[in-house]
Image: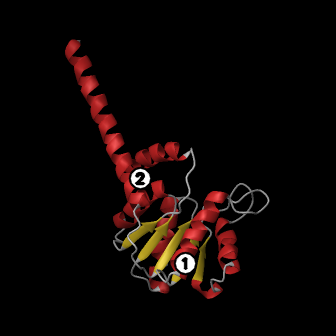
Amino acid sequence: MKKSKRIVKIALIAFIIWLLAHSVYTVVDGLSNNGKKADIAVILGSKVNENGTLSERLKKRLECGLDLYINKRVKKIIVSGGLGKEGFYEGDKMKEFLIQNNVPDSLIFVDNYGNNTVATVENTIKLKDSLKYQSLIVVSQYFHLTRTKMLFNKRGFKNVSGASPNYFEIRDLYSILREFVAYYTE
């Protein structure tokens, strides 16, 4: 009995160390902006409010992507999101924001079927030949970038980096834990 308790205790400690190490890596990786240039940015969607305005999180992602474009780090932008329960296609609303901020319509590509991270990655890869890109920068919250880049890598696309807005919420703590689970189950 004593030996089995010790094994359980060691396993629990090992799991906690693994969780903490992975979480620290995720945060550091997500907050590290290497300043690289890429052919295209992929901005992942988030909530559009019931009145059609962008949630603060989505607005900050778009501002981050806009900054990449303005500073000539990317040439084109893919906006990817799904149809929210509020009744708006995230991609369409994201495109409206970018156009209002002087990004030419011809440089913005909408994916309204990016209902989750996996769908966004797969839909983006399908556009590779038609958009003729070899590198990309994923734009999302810092805690989401490690897993998103991993998903691109798993599907054979290696030239991917990330950028995140300087926007933090208390719910990020939950999101970091959720990303730990999602990283190992996708």
Quadrant of the rendered structure where residue 125 is?
Answer: bottom left
For this view, does 103 lie left or right of residue 151? Answer: right
Residue at the location (35% across, 63% down)?
Answer: 154
Q: Residue 24's x, y, as percent?
A: 36, 48
Q: Mark 1 points at which residue?
A: 77
Tags 1 and 2 in contact by the CB under 8 Å rule? no
List the single residue furthest toward the left: 3
Residue at the location (33% across, 71% down)?
Answer: 158
Q: Residue 31's x, y, as percent?
A: 43, 59
Query: Looking at the image, which is closer to me, 15 or 83?
Result: 15
Relative vertical location of residue 123 with respect to residue 57 in this rendering, above or below = below
Q: Residue 12's x, y, as percent?
A: 31, 29
Q: Which of marks 1 and 2 is nearer the N terminus?
A: 2
- The crowding category of the residue bearing disc 2, from other C-alpha atoms within 10 Å (few below 14, some 14 to 19, many at least 20), is some
Quadrant of the rendered structure where residue 50 is?
Answer: bottom right
Specify the amino acid type for callout 2: Val
Name the disc covering residue 27, or none: 2
Q: Distance between the residues labelled 1 and 2?
A: 24 Å
Relative vertical location of residue 141 with respect to residue 132 in this rendering, above or below = above
Q: Which colour scheme is used?
A: secondary structure
For this view, does 12 lie left or right of residue 179? Answer: left
Query: Looking at the image, which is closer to me, 44 or 110?
Result: 44
Q: Quadrant of the N terminus?
A: top left
- Tag 2's secondary structure? helix
For this view, does 149 lie left or right of residue 15? Answer: right
Q: Residue 104's x, y, as percent?
A: 63, 86
Of labels 1 and 2, the one closer to you: 2
Residue at the location (67% across, 62% down)?
Answer: 83
